[in-house]
Amino acid sequence: MSSNPNIQPLLDICVLYVEDEEIIQTAVHEFLSFRVRKIILARNGKEGLDAFMKETPDLVITDIKMPLMNGIVMSEEIRSLAPKIPIIITTAYNETEFLLSAREIGINDFLIKPLNLNKFSELLEKYAREKGV
Amino acid sequence: MQNPIQILMVEDVPTDAEIIQYELTRSRITFHATVVDNETDFRENLSRNKPDLILSDYSLPSFDGISAFLILKKVRPETPFIFVSGEIGEDLAIEAMKLGVTDYVFKDRLQRLGPAVKRAMSELDEKNRRREMENQILFLASMVESSEDAIIGVDLELRVFSWNEGAMRMSGYTPEDVIGKPVNILTPDEHRNEERLQFESLARGEKLGHFETVRVRKDGRRLDVSLSISPVRNHSSAIIGYSLIARDISERIRTQRQLEELNRNLERRIREEVDKNREKDLLLIRQSRLSGMAELIRNISHYWRQPLNALGIIIQNIRYNYDTGELSSGYIDSIINRTMDILQNLSRSIDDFRIFSKSDEEKTVFDTSELVEHAISFVRPAYRSDFVEIHGRFTPGILISGMPNEFSNVLINLLNNAREALVDRKIADPVIELEVRAENGKAVLVVRDNAGGIAPEIQEHIFEPYFTTREKGTGIGLYMSKMMIEQNMHGYLTFRNTAEGAEFRVELPVVS
């Protein structure tokens, strides 16, 4: 295997990824495995909250529309537990209203679907830097 | 002179009074007499008894005839006053007559008294009758003048001699314009012959009655009038002229003509209304199809979003796999498989959606539960995006007859109403329950939500076309759904509120 200048080192962060659609979850999980060291998966808001409390992820990435507990409610709960943890939502909505109200809840960033993995990478690097790795 | 004449006598000599009264009786005059000899009694009697006739002596010891007459003239001037006295000389007699005394009879020629009294009374009668006649004439003239109708007097040569205010108002002609002119200046040319014949017929003594015709005003404008012409006769029944009474009926004629035109157009208007209604029905169907399409597009967009998202990530992952040298042949196959799966699913959904919107389909027999589950699979993504859960309990094998897409559209309409209510009212755990089951030999489909139910004041309107409580609602869905179920599928669509929300129920005959 020759050394490839394009191979990027794994970021030393733990990411909690919450998404209920299996086909998406699989594809995004694959992508994350190229970029971060540790990945925790959850299939809905409740699982996500449980996972958050059990492990201690450095970053939360979540979809919004999920059964049992949606992404917004889960984010609010997580915020109340850890006010500083960065939360990124993946959303199909690019309406300003929605984005502004999400900001108010304390969402840090957005990824508009269909996901652009370069942008996704940049966000991962940004929050990894903030953490100090 | 049937009634007894009330006579007031001014006479101081009783025997004279008797003789005078005897003379009156001899002349066959019925009377009742009172005798006074002084001013006070005279005045009192005048006012109290109101005599018809005064017979007075010329001079009395405490009174005199001239004074009595002057008093009478002031108080009751119409009453006849006859002097009955001895010789006084012609000059005095003439003076008295000049004053206005009715007559003068000398006592030594009393035979003149009877005729004098009779003459005086008949003159009085005459005067009264004349005054009454004058009053009547004045009244009639005033009636004519104040009448709103045109009242026209025409002489034997058919020239106008009387023209009331009504005629002036109606025609615009002043009396000066028309008096002396032939009455046919008011008649338009085409009616002149008719008018001439009418007058000839009247002259022969034939009756005319009133009739409707047209006359012309001074300004040339035509007037619809109801006219009656009557001959005016004198005492010997000879015709001395004609009276025309005309009433303006243009208002009534106008109304009549409008009514006729209305009737003529009625048939045409009924036809137009029927066509308009048919158009409205077509519009309704078109609108419902449009709103159905909007729903369809919404459903499609939700259905496609995640698969497209997934495709994007799969493709983008190729770069990472290549960079880390993991782009193996096996991996490439997996990419291909996953991609083709997604694309086939999306492609199939296009066909299915197209079938959904097809309108010219045929009636078939189909399994209710199968169809319902199939329909739900399309809308599930859209419903999930609103956090609405759909729970279903479907009994297989219940066959119904109908157009599958039409039925699916009804189902989706009911589901959408429930979803919209749940979203609008921000229900915490929004759930739609679906059931397909058999009940008493009928196929029953139930759509139940927990959105809180439909308000009582709205309930009776929900199946009406264009009735909606939502700002963007079209109000067509339930009306069309009910039409489809009841008319095309011979079933029932009913609604009731449950403890938690609304429940719609479709009942259909089962095909065995």
Image (cartoon, rainbow, N blue to C red):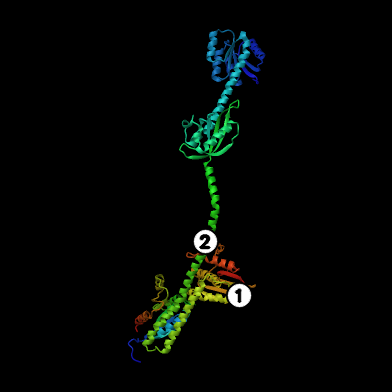
Whole-percent x, y for residue B63 in the image: 57, 12
- Disc 1: CA contacts within 10 A as few (<14), some (14-19) or many (>=20): many
Which amino acid does the dot numbered 1 rest on? Leu
* Residue B114 visible within the image: yes
> Residue at 53% of width from left, 47% of height from top?
B258
Mark whose residue sits in front, 1 or 2: 2
Q: Which residue is mark 1?
A: B399
Residue B142's disc number: none
The answer for which chain carries disc 2 is B
Whole-percent x, y for residue A124 in the image: 37, 81
In this view, which residue lies farthest toward the left? A5
Q: CA distance from mark 1 to mark 2?
A: 34 Å
Closer to the chain start, of discs 1 and 2, is: 2
Which amino acid does the dot numbered 2 rest on? Lys
Toward the viewer: B508 or B105? B508
Q: Quarter of the image for the N terminus of chain A: give it.
A: bottom left
Residue B280's disc number: 2
* Residue B450 visible within the image: no
